[in-house]
Every structure is written in C-alpha cells, then in structure tokens.
Image: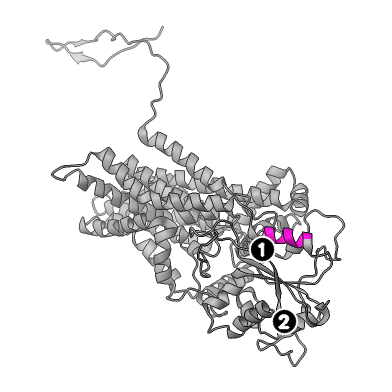
C-alpha cells in the first residue's frame, strides 16, 4: 500500500493538519494528439523524400556528371584496396568515407562492394544517391527543429523547412552522389546546435554545433561557414552574462572553446589525413583555391558573364525560389528596422559574407551556393511570419490560417512546379543512353569512333561483359592519341611531346583541319554533344576555330543520328553550367545534352 500525502496547511489555531488525499480518476491509455505542424512535418518529409527518389536512377549505368563519375563513389571503392589515404584534397574525403561504410554494410563486405561496382555499377551509384536523398530529407527535419527552437513558432519553422525541402537545387542534387547535399545535412546539425545555444545556452548544444561544423567542413570545405552563427550565438550568451552574471559569461566562453575543439576533432575524424599527410592536404587546399579564383587555370569556356555575385543572386531566384529570396531580403531589412540586432547578426552576416567570398571567385556554379540555403530559408520564413502578423492588423484583417496558406502558396509554388517538371524529365531515358543504344545497333564493334568528352570513360564499354571487344574492354576505339600532340593551332608540337587536353579547354583544341585528320586515320564516326559545342557557340570570340570546326563537320559529315532533350518545337536552351545540366527550363523533355552522330566519307572512310 502506497502512502500518498499532500502538503500541510496551517489550521485556524496554528495547528498543522494533514488534508486527506484527493481521489484521483483512474488513468487511461495516453492519447497522442497530433498537432497541425506535426502532421504537416510528416507530410512534408514524405513529400520531399519522394521528390528526391523520383528519377534517382537517371543516366545509369553510366554517370554523366563529371564529379560524380570521378570523385566520391570511385574514391570510396578505392579505399577497399587498403589505402585509406585519398591522395586528393581538392574535395575533402568525408563523404567518400561515409559511402565506404554504407557500401560495406549494404553489400555485406568490401569485396562484394567492389564486385558490384565492377559488374553492376548501377547498384552502387543508386545506393550512394539514395544515401544523399535520405540525408537531404533528414536535413529538412533538422532545419524544422532548429526553427522551432530559434523562432519559437512552429508554423514558421514548418514553412522554413518547406522552403528548404522543396527548393529546386537541393532536390536536384539529391539525385546525384555528390557531397553537396550531405554537407547540407551537417550544416543543419550545426544549426540545430546553434539554435539551442541561442535559446538555452546549454553545453550539449555547443557540442552538437561543433560536431556539425567539423563534419560539414570535412564533407565540403565551404560548409565551415556555419562557424559564423555559432560564434554570434555564443557571443550573445556571453553578453547576457556580463556584467551582472560573470559566471554565465565564463560558461559561454568555456563551452565555445569546447565546441571549436569538438569541431576540430570531428573534422580530423572525417578527414584524418589532413594531418597524417599534411603536405598533400596543403597542396590540395591551395590547388582548390587557385582553381576557384582562376589563378592556376583560365575561366571555363562558356562561363556566364557578369561575375559571380550577380550569378548567385540570379541563382537564388530559381535555385531556392524568387518568393523565398525576396522574403529573406525583406526579413533582413525588418530585423534591422525592429532593432533585433542579435537575431540579425545570427542570420544575415554569415550568408552575406559567404555570397561575397564565393561571388568574387573566377568560377561559379549554382550548387556552390547551397550551404547557406538553410539559413536563407529561415530568414524567408521569418519574413513571411511578419507579413502574416501584419495582415492580422489590417482594418479588415485576414485570419491567420488563411493568411498563412496564401503566403505558403506564394512561396512554394515556383519550387514545386519546377521540381515536379524536373523529376518527370529525370525519370525518362537519358539522351546519351539513347545515342549509345543506336550506336550499338548500327556501328560495328571495333570501329574507330571519335567521341567528344561529354560522356564518362567507360561509356564505350559494356558493364559486366567478360569478353571485351577491345583489349581495354571497350566496344569501340574512342580517342586518337595523336590529338594530344597538337598545339592549340592544330600543329604538331615541335618536340614531339604531348599536351594534356583538359575538359574545360577542349573547345580551344578544335579547328576545321581535324576532320581531314579523322578521315586519314579512319575515324569515320564522330559523336558530338552540346555540353561541349554549346560552350563555343555562347563564347564565339574565345574559340572561333571551334565554330569553324563544327560548321565544317556539319558540311562534310553525314548526320546519321541526333537526339535532343527538348520538347518538339521548343527553343533550345543556351549553354550554361547550370541549366544545361539540371534541366530546370520547361523546354526539357529528356535529361542530357543534344547528341549528334556524323559519318565521314573522305580519305580512309571512303566507300
């Protein structure tokens, strides 16, 4: 028998009495009543995961994204040879290590993963892409949790998660085994910790923020920008403790140091060879910085003119959405107007500094902007919340549910329309796969075929085939070795040496006389792709010889096959390093570039 007592009370004469225990109703089963934001979050996560998985196998068994084909998945498979040093630090290896763990766990052993990569690369790449899709969805949940703690309004946090979860660029790059979306996951881990530091100044939140910061930096170097909001949140916590409560200030400073140590430890765990092979690490960082700034390599042919800052501002209008971008800008102004300087400092300076730093580089691509999308989404949602509050103060006020629904529709419609269009496109056959199927049916094995660098190196091979047509496993002989002995003008180098032809400068090696050389060496088939030719035609002044080459090829060559990604009657999209790759414009009906196949009939190709 359990004795239940209640607090004592003072009797009228000063005596203590004990009140009899109150009768308690029997407890029934606890009922979980789902809240509106909770149900909305579940639906949002299901939607955003579905959008990331739709079309996840696009282009396979070949990978047509250069970075996906060369970096993270191959690096992860390479670790199984026993050398865990990536020997390559242009990109940090954190995501490659993660994939190695995933591959060994999924396939059962390192040998099974290597065997699958050799015989069935689709299975390995699909697993890596699904990993990105799951991490991208988890990032949406983490951003919601950060918004709940930071903004303390669940529907505003849900709107921030919806802006981020349906944005075009994060969903598109969830379809590829690249480090961009995994970086977003760790950035959101850090932001969840930062929000806890901001709201409650708890030690565990400092450590969580440090963990996210460290692994984000080890996954993609630019993920380290999230140190800015961490330091702002810590400075606010320290400021709140001075001078009235110096103990709290000491607490904040101590845990900030702890967070930075955790960040260093997490970075080292996910990228251990930064100190085990420090010279290679320094060399890789320097090479990455030089390439981005244009110090070591000229700008990529076909780069959109106007500079990176303008390019990234334009990217916001479609990669995140015009509505959310404008709402974020209005929110930044509103925070200053309301003199909420600490919140302004938490959400605004970091993204602005990131934008300026990345925008001043020589090279710029839309996906490089993504690490700041979570904070910009929070800003946009906060601005939307202020707009709804303002609507409630009108002479004829809008009720909050209606106002919130209208704002959500305005902010999310563009992204949802573009994502649904793109996923439909990605679920259809890739143009380069269609071209290869035609070649398999019409070009005999062992023929010389000149193929522009618009496909991966294994494109001429049959995955899993045990009786290769050529000694190197290729169906067709693909690349004439004598092309690398030419100077940019087409003349043979006087010392007889070779000159590597880089992907970015390939167009500058072309000239009309190459066609006669193809014919002389019996390269009677030429495969051309708009991902290369398009660079020359949008920058004709930089590669005039290439323009002449393509015109000569069209004049003397017989066009035997062409496949276009565009809908019938649609205007082709001018070349660009985003819209020519991610199929954002509505003109696309298939993924991939325009592929044209020519048959030459001169010289050794006659007859």
Mark 1 Cα-neighbour bin, 10 Å: few <14, some 14–19, many ≥20: few
Choose top left, top right, bottom left or bottom right for residue 15: top left
Mark 2 Cα-neighbour bin, 10 Å: few <14, some 14–19, many ≥20: many
Q: Is residue 84 visible?
A: yes
Q: Which residues are magenta?
A: 433-441
Residue 501, placed above or below residue 159: below
Rendered location of residue 378, percent (x, y):
36, 51
**Residue with the mark numbered 2:** 515
Residue 453, placed above or below residue 333: below
- Gap between marks 1 and 2, in whole Å? 30 Å
Q: Nearer the viewer, mark 1 or mark 2?
A: 2
Rendered location of residue 37, percent (x, y):
37, 36
| Helix, strand or loop at mark 1 | helix
**Residue with the mark numbered 1:** 70
Instruction: Please identify the quadrant where the N terminus is shown.
Output: top left
Q: Is residue 440 magenta?
A: yes
Q: Is residue 466 magenta?
A: no
| Helix, strand or loop at mark 2 | helix
Would residue 275 appear left or right of 491 to someone viewing this image?
left
**Dominant secondary-structure state across the stretch colored magenta:** helix
Report the number of discs. Answer: 2
Front one among 50 and 137:
50
Residue 357, placed above or below residue 390: below
């Amino acid at each position: 028998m359990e004795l239940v007592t209640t607090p004592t009370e003072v009797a009228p004469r000063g005596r203590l009495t004990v009140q009899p225990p109150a009768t308690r109703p029997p407890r029934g089963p606890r009922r979980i009543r789902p809240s509106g934001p909770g149900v909305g979050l579940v639906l949002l996560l299901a939607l955003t995961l579905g959008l990331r998985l739709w079309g996840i196998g696009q282009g396979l068994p070949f990978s047509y994204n250069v970075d996906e084909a060369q970096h993270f998945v191959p690096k992860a498979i390479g670790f199984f040879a026993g050398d865990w040093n990536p020997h390559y630090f242009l990109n940090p290896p954190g995501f490659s290590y993660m994939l190695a763990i995933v591959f060994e766990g999924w396939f059962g052993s390192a040998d099974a993963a290597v065997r699958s990569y050799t015989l069935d690369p689709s299975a390995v790449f699909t697993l890596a892409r699904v990993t990105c899709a799951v991490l991208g969805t988890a990032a949406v949940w983490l951003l919601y949790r950060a918004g709940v703690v930071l903004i303390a309004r669940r529907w505003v946090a849900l709107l921030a998660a919806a802006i981020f979860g349906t944005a075009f660029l994060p969903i598109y790059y969830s379809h590829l085994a690249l480090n961009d979306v995994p970086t977003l996951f760790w950035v959101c881990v850090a932001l969840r910790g930062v929000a806890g530091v901001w709201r409650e100044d708890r030690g565990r939140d400092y450590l969580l923020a440090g963990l996210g910061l460290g692994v984000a930096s080890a996954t993609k170097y630019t993920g380290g920008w999230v140190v800015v909001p961490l330091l702002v949140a810590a400075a606010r916590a320290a400021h709140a403790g001075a001078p009235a409560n110096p103990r709290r200030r000491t607490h904040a400073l101590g845990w900030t140091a702890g967070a930075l140590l955790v960040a260093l430890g997490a970075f080292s765990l996910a990228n251990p060879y930064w100190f085990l092979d420090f010279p290679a690490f320094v060399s890789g960082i320097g090479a990455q910085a030089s390439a981005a700034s244009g110090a070591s390599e000229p700008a990529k042919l076909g780069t959109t003119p106007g500079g990176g800052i303008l390019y990234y501002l334009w990217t916001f209008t479609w990669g995140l959405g015009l509505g959310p971008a404008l709402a974020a800008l209005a929110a930044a102004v509103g925070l200053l107007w309301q003199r909420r300087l600490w919140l302004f400092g938490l959400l605004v300076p970091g993204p602005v500094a990131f934008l300026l730093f990345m925008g001043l580089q020589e090279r710029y691509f839309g996906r490089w902007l993504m690490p700041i999308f979570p904070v910009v989404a929070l800003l946009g949602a906060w601005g939307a919340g202020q707009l709804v509050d303002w609507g409630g103060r009108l002479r004829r006020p809008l009720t909050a549910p209606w106002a919130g629904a209208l704002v959500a529709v305005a902010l999310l419609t563009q992204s949802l329309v573009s994502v649904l269009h793109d996923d439909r496109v990605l679920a259809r056959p890739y143009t380069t796969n269609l071209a290869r199927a035609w070649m398999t049916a019409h070009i005999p094995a062992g023929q010389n075929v000149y193929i522009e660098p618009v496909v991966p190196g294994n494109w001429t091979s049959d995955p899993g085939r045990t009786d290769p047509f050529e000694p190197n496993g290729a169906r067709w002989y693909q690349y004439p070795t004598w092309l690398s002995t030419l100077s940019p003008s087409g003349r043979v180098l006087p010392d007889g040496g070779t000159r590597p032809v880089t992907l970015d400068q390939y167009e500058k090696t072309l000239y009309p006389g190459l066609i006669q050389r193809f014919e002389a060496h019996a390269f009677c088939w030429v495969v051309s792709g708009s991902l290369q030719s398009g660079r020359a035609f949008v920058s004709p002044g930089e590669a005039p010889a290439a323009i002449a080459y393509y015109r000569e090829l069209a004049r003397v060559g017989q066009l035997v096959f062409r496949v276009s990604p565009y809908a019938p009657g649609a205007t082709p999209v001018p070349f660009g390093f985003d819209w020519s790759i991610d199929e954002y414009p509505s003109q696309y009906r298939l993924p991939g570039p325009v592929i044209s196949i020519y048959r030459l009939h001169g010289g050794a190709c006659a007859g």
